[in-house]
Image: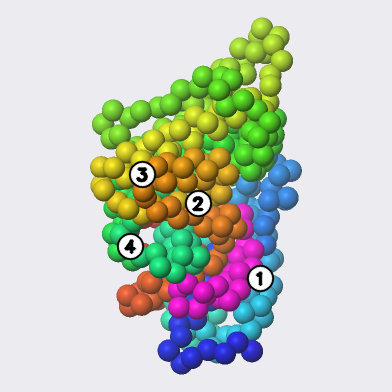
């Protein structure tokens, strides 16, 4: 059994917003005692993307086992838990509901406080886990399957969104392009890998700039450019070099993400920059940002890849800071599929 001091805050965290059923126990916001992830990826790969109905059903099937294992791995009993934190949005409504209903049931039965957590806040807070000294304020680029945000983290739980995507999220663009070039789902990791064998300068894909907000992103034009390129090759009967397309597309995304981020670093004069979300595990993006930050004398923070993609440890970290601020939710806590960052839950 894990030794805990009376003042330690142990959060049992639950995450089920998309296709990962996850639970974790996190101590004092920064120490992960357990982090259990059941990934449904193999199941959804058959269909070329996440099927919401299947995701919800699989969450129901797995969630109890995953939570049990998280408590066992941490060596703590439910009685020792201080509070239960759960992702309540944004995400797939059916998938979110499974986690929210489960968290409410456990918190009610065990007489523990309940804390609803914003999924993107969780991604940002993943940075606290391996960097004990990191504190706000800092600038964070959040790039996941559903979001591309450039966020000023002003304080714990206090965010100002400087830029966001006008259309597709970065991860969504990776997934769509991967499908178009025959790599399948999930696209991000596959493009990351295949790009190592390609030439990033082979094809000149566009880098979109948004006139009225230089920090906003747009990836749908890039996606269309890739589709047009592929169509053109087909019509002219030219063989497509999959690795070159992957590498050139990825370079276009990375250039835009790094460019916008460094513009904001300069404009806001920050000395700490972090990344978060599934796309933050992209090796080429990590390397490019590392170099760009080093050139500017900016400290660069990036969670380990396993803490970038969906997990519950990040929800435990975010839940801790919400709990410390006095946030408590009632039994009417609901799933909010379009929850905005900073919006009151
Ligand atoms: O944060 P996440 O796990 O789930 C959401 O909240 O959306 O992000 C999933 C996204 C997917 O679009 C996936 O293709 C992308 O992150 N991703 C990557 C990599 N690993 C995951 N994109 C680029 N390179 C990767 N290595
Ligand atoms: Zn996510």
Distance CA(mark 2)–CA(mark 3): 23 Å
The residue range painted magenta reads 18-37
Residue that carries the numbered disc 4 in the rendered image: 136
Determine whether the beta carbon of the residue marked 2 sits less than 8 angstroms from the nearest atom of ligand 1.
Answer: yes
Secondary structure type for disc 4 = loop
Which residue was labeled with disc 1?
Answer: 66
- Upstream in sequence: badge 1 or badge 3: 1
Q: Say whether disc 4 or disc 2 marks the residue closer to the N-terminus.
A: 4
Q: Residues within 10 Å of mark 3 (few under 14, many from 20)?
A: few
Residue 81: x and y, percent?
Answer: 52, 84
Label drawn at residue 277 = 2
From the viewer's side, name the closer residue of 266 and 326.
266
Q: Is residue 124 above or below residue 9?
A: above
* Front disc: 4 or 2: 4
Residue 321, percent from left and from top: 38, 72
Q: Is residue 312 left or right of residue 28?
A: right
The quadrant where residue 311 appears:
bottom right
Magenta span: helix, strand or loop, mainly?
A: strand
Q: Which residue is mark 3?
A: 296
């Amino acid at each position: 059994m894990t030794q805990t001091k009376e003042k330690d805050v142990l959060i049992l965290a639950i995450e089920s917003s998309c296709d990962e059923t996850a639970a974790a126990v996190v101590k004092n916001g920064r120490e992960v005692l357990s982090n259990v992830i059941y990934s449904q990826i193999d199941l959804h790969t058959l269909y070329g993307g996440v099927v919401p109905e299947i995701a919800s059903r699989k969450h129901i099937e797995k969630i109890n086992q995953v939570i049990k294992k998280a408590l066992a791995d941490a060596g703590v009993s439910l009685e020792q838990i201080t509070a239960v934190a759960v992702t309540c949005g944004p995400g797939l409504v059916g998938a979110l509901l499974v986690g929210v209903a489960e968290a409410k049931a456990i918190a009610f039965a065990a007489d523990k406080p309940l804390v609803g957590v914003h999924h993107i806040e969780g991604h940002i807070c993943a940075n606290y886990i391996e960097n004990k000294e990191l504190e706000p304020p800092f600038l964070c680029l959040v790039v996941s399957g559903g979001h591309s945000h450039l966020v000023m983290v002003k304080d714990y739980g206090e965010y100002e969104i400087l830029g966001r995507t006008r259309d597709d999220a970065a991860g969504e663009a990776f997934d769509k392009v991967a499908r178009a070039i025959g790599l399948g789902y999930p696209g991000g990791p596959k493009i990351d890998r295949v790009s190592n064998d390609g030439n990033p300068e082979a094809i000149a894909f566009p880098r979109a700039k948004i006139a009225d907000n230089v920090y906003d992103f747009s990836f749908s034009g890039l996606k269309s450019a890739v589709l047009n390129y592929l169509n053109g090759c087909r019509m002219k009967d030219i063989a497509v070099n999959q690795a070159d397309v992957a590498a050139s597309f990825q370079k276009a995304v990375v250039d835009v993400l790094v460019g916008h981020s460094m513009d904001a670093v300069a404009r806001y004069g920050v000395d700490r920059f972090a990344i978060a979300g599934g796309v933050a595990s992209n090796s080429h993006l990590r390397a490019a940002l590392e170099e760009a930050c080093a050139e500017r004398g900016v400290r660069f923070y990036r969670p380990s890849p396993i803490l970038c993609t969906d997990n519950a440890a990040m929800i435990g970290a975010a839940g801790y800071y919400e709990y410390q601020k006095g946030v408590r939710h009632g039994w009417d806590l609901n799933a909010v599929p379009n929850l905005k960052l900073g919006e009151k839950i």
